[in-house]
Image (cartoon, grey):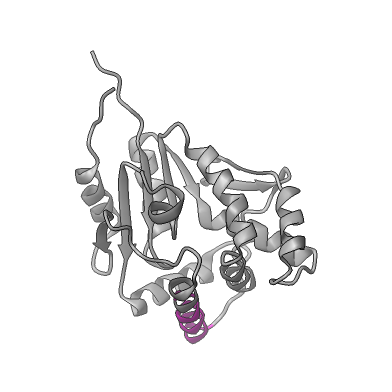
Amino acid sequence: MFDVKPLLVTIDGPAGAGKTTVSRLLAESLGYTYVDTGALYRAVALAALSENCQIDDDARLGEICRQLGLRFENSPKGPRLFMNEVDITDQIRTPEITMFASAVSARPVVREYLLVVQREMGKNGGVVFEGRDMGTVVFPDAEIKFFLDADPGIRALRRYKELQVGPGQTKISLDRVTQTMKKRDEDDSSRALAPLRPAHDAIRIDSSLLGIEQIIDLMLRYIPVLAK
């Protein structure tokens, strides 16, 4: 009789492609842990803003990172992110944090810190990591890699709807969401350090016309049962 080997699954892609919902539900389907790596960068952004740290002050950013204790905790409403034992899940979903997190993610000192944090979380497998460079930089040897994308207009509308109903959100216009997402896409894709792009061996899925359940079913078809 064989023991099933826990896999490490990565799901990369731009904002609004459906990564968060898909990653969480796929993890539940597999009985795996779900890790929202974007939330980790948002946590650093929140801490930096709280300390009035400038985005180009790498020395200060390094100090802030070294003082952070980050962990996820499951709850009936989904995973919650704690920073130094304070639940910051709702605080990190504002447009200001979104833009600052994108800028923070381009700083080598922050990426080096979170690289260690993420690899520690995934060292034993049985994890679904959602992010932008999971399959290219953080876990290049992951057994299963997905790249989830969608039409820019559809992605902007999805994010706009999320911001209208999410906790702790500031109501903003669809036009502003569209422009913010366009700027973030450009920043994430053009940066020299770990740009947003599919891994060469990633399974690419366009979610524009697919429902969540359809995406999950499609992904499950690609996930083999591995044995030791």
Q: Is residue 161 visible?
A: yes
Residue at 40%, 34% in the rendered image: 126
Residue 159 place in picture, x, y as percent: 45, 71
Q: Is residue 91 visible?
A: no
Query: How many tags in the picture?
Result: 0
Residue 223 place in picture, x, y as percent: 24, 41
Q: Judge whether residue 176 is colored magenta.
A: yes
Instruction: Please name whichever residue, 194 or 152, is drawn nearer the observer in this view of the structure.
Output: 194
Residue at 66%, 58% in the rendered image: 44
In the image, residue 167 sits, relative to residue 217, either above or below, namely below
Furthest residue toward top: 1
Residue at 52%, 53% in the rendered image: 37
Instruction: Please name whichever residue, 48 or 25, is drawn nearer the observer in this view of the structure.
Output: 48
User: What is the chief secondary structure element of the magenta stretch?
Assistant: helix
Report the magenta residues as a range. 173-185
Q: Judge whether residue 192 is colored magenta.
A: no
